[in-house]
Amino acid sequence: MTTAREVSSLLVQLGVDRSAYEGGTLIVRSPIDGAIIGQLRETPAAEVTAAIGRAQQAFLAWREIPAPRRGELVRLFGEELRANKDALGRLVTLEAGKIVQEGLGEVQEMIDICDYAVGLSRQLYGLTIATERPGHVMRETWHPLGVVGIISAFNFPVAVWSWNAALAFVCGDACIWKPSEKTPLTALATHALFEKAAARFGGVPAGLSALIIGQRDIGEVLVDDPRVPLISATGSTRMGREVGPRLAKRFARALLELGGNNGMIVCPSADLDLAVRGILFAAVGTAGQRCTSLRRLFVHASVYDTLVDRLKRAYGSVPVGSPLETGTLVGPLIDRAAYEMMQKSLGAAAEAGGKTVGGDRVLSEQFPDAFYVRPALVEMPSQVEVVCHETFAPILYVLRYTDLADAIALHNAVPQGLSSSIFTTDLREAETFLSAAGSDCGIVNVNIGPSGAEIGGAFGGEKETGGGRESGSDSWRAYMRRATNTVNYSRSLPLAQGIKFEVDA
Ligand code: NAD
């Protein structure tokens, strides 16, 4: 079966109407073979504005429904995902090029966040705080926020929406989703499953969840609308630089999940078997197209040759090919532009003295319109400019170190701050890396790689990664507004700070 035909049959199976992906102006190609797999109707700006209006009305009704009842909608959606995991996972593979296991893993992550959100729907708690005034109580309450705009990237085409939406729905918000223009088909399918869950729930206010299809210009309509108090935007730092100031201008909340440039330090005492596996999954998995992909490796001089030799062997043999084939571990890059960026960075690294293994295009005869590459391992003499920026492709820069303090300083000397890890069996080294003077990232791991986070923790990073946190821990607070309440149940009116303000009346 051709990719186009398989995509169409999966979309129909998942409940998407053909009119949504045939005959439109947004052309979508599968990175597997470059074939056109969808021609979507783009949402005009006026329809985006109308969808925001409907979402605003839906929010007014939804916020009054008790949170545990709202959780029931997310529970039903989780059931739809469970029942359709194979089909949606395969669609992720066909549209984003992830290997089958990772496509399924992405849907599993959606199921996990639904389960988490259902539990959370009974735990949206506030504090009770001691007051200085007799006969008073002070507490804080958390209320639904409003319409949440969700802008997502191509590389997690559906999980990122669910991280936001599952929480936002239990928090009492409405959602409008602008998926990547490179991966809107999986969004259509996900939204169709959500609508099935909503129909089973019954009584979901119309417009509570909307999907808008198009390029960045319709994302901008969402970003600029004063009826949208929170934008959660996942993508490049370039995108964050455009979106952040626009939101600041109208004092809206920004939850930014931007680019990473993730590092790992391998110490003399490291378990090298573990390290090799951790490095490979993090650096070549998803063809290096995760925000948490490993891009910089700092190896202690005493284990450098042993580790780098093992990595070179693994890099030479890791199976690259169609993500649909069993055994493939590295699928294609998303498109030609990604391939060209990779080659440009490899050129700059070579000019700066880097020695590269891999990085060449493969399978171009079998797939002339797709871009498969052998992952690149580049031994660098120093952390030059090209190492300091994110190239969204499987390039791993390797640097040698002798002193841990120097390695940590180099590790932190990049503009991004998403994820990081250290491989060591020395408690002092591990705790130093985790300490205030250690890694400056939002995610800091010991003896596991920087990628593949679980949904239970807060996900996000510092510096140019944008500072946002989503998914687990207390990330739900971003989707609610906090009110501090003071209640006087006494018969007098003492003022705070001991202020006397007597009036005869
Ligand atoms: P991208 O920045 O090109 O696009 C992301 C989304 O933003 C798309 O939906 C796009 O249409 C939209 N967009 C772009 N400019 C916009 C603007 N001015 N206004 C409104 N919307 C706009 O990113 P991409 O190529 O799809 O994804 C790869 C990037 O995403 C990498 O940098 C990666 O590190 C990052 N990423 C980060 C995380 C994270 O959680 N930190 C997760 C996944 C991906």
Image: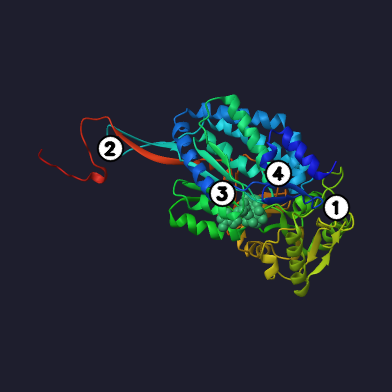
Q: Position of residue 24 (x, y in %)?
A: 67, 47
- Per the image, label 1 sits on a secondary structure element best described as loop
Q: Is residue 30 above or below residue 354?
A: above
Q: Earlier in the sequence, mark 2 or mark 1?
A: 2
Classify mark 3: residues with Cα within 10 Å, few (<14), some (14-19) or many (20+).
few
Circles 4 and 3, Cβ within 8 Å, touching? The answer is no
State yes or no: discs 2 and 4 in contact (Cβ < 8 Å). no
Which mark is nearer the camera, 1 or 3? Answer: 3
The tag earlier along the polypeptide, 1 or 4, is 4
Using the image, determine if residue 362 lies above or below residue 67.
Answer: below
Of label 2 and label 4, which has the lower sequence position?
4
Helix, strand, or loop for circle 3?
loop
- Secondary-structure class at tag 2: loop
Mark 1 and mark 3 lie on one chain; the one further toward the N terminus is 3
Residue 22: assigned label: 4
Question: What amino acid is found at the position of numbered circle 1 in the picture?
Answer: Val
Label 2 crowd bin: few (<14), some (14–19), many (20+), radius 10 Å: some
Cα–Cα span, label 2 and label 4: 66 Å
Pick the front one: 387 or 383: 387
Amino acid type, label 4: Glu
- Could you tell me residue 129's position as x and y percent? 38, 37
Residue 201 locus on image (x, y percent): 57, 25
Q: Residues within 10 Å of mark 1 (few under 14, many from 20)?
A: many
Residue pointed to by mark 2: 133
Dot 4 or dot 3, earlier in sequence: 4
Q: Which residue is mark 1?
A: 320
Residue 44 badge = 3
Percent of width and height locating residue 6: 80, 40
